[in-house]
Amino acid sequence: MEEIVRVHPEPDTHLERTLDPRGWSRDLAIVGASTSMVLPVLTGESAGLALAVAAIGATLGALLGRAVPALLTRRVRRLPLVVLALAGAGLGANWGALVAVLALLTLGASSMWSVELGAQVFMIQLGWFWIPAVWLRARGKVTWPLVLLVIGVCPLIAVALAR
């Protein structure tokens, strides 16, 4: 009998699933795209610019997803939950600021205020998404409901920060 060889075999163990960069890249690309769309809406930019900023957020999210397994080393996985949550929020703030800076430099977005706003929005999103995502992956559960929740929370964040 012929043996079927998979080019990208599915991870077998929960730890492999937790550290699988493909799943993290997919999830963080979606989180990045949906969260990035909040920035142009809050700064009064056009819908076209919102889509372009979403592409930047998705690209950076996919790249970040490739790096997440390196961030989840055995030593890091043993840190207290509070430290991991704060690290997720800090990582999100830097990700959001980078999205906003790239939007300003490449797309000519008009507001420097969006850099601070980008940091805030992504800090909120990744701050609450990070721990449940790691927990779900570590237990071999699907993450798509959590990713859908991120998409649903984006308008709420926009409304809260617009006030």
Image (cartoon, rainbow, N blue to C red):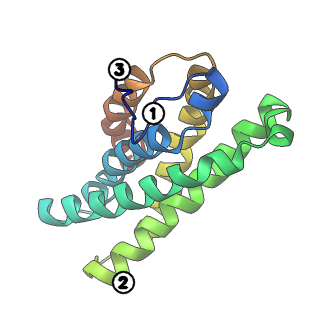
Q: Which mark is residue 9?
A: 1
Q: Name the residue under label 2.
A: 105
Name the residue furthest front: 1
Disc 1 element:
loop
Q: Name the residue under label 3.
A: 1
Disc 3 from disc 1: Cα separation: 19 Å
> Which amino acid does the dot numbered 1 rest on?
Pro
x, y percentage for residue 78? 85, 32
The first of marks 3 and 1 along the sequence is 3
| 140 relative position to 71: left or right | left
> Which amino acid does the dot numbered 3 rest on?
Met
Disc 3 element:
loop
Residue drawn at x 45%, y 33% is 9
Crowd rating for badge 1 (residues with CA inside 10 Å; few <14, some 14–19, many 20+): few
x, y percentage for residue 19? 61, 37
The first of marks 1 and 2 along the sequence is 1
Crowd rating for badge 3 (residues with CA inside 10 Å; few <14, some 14–19, many 20+): few
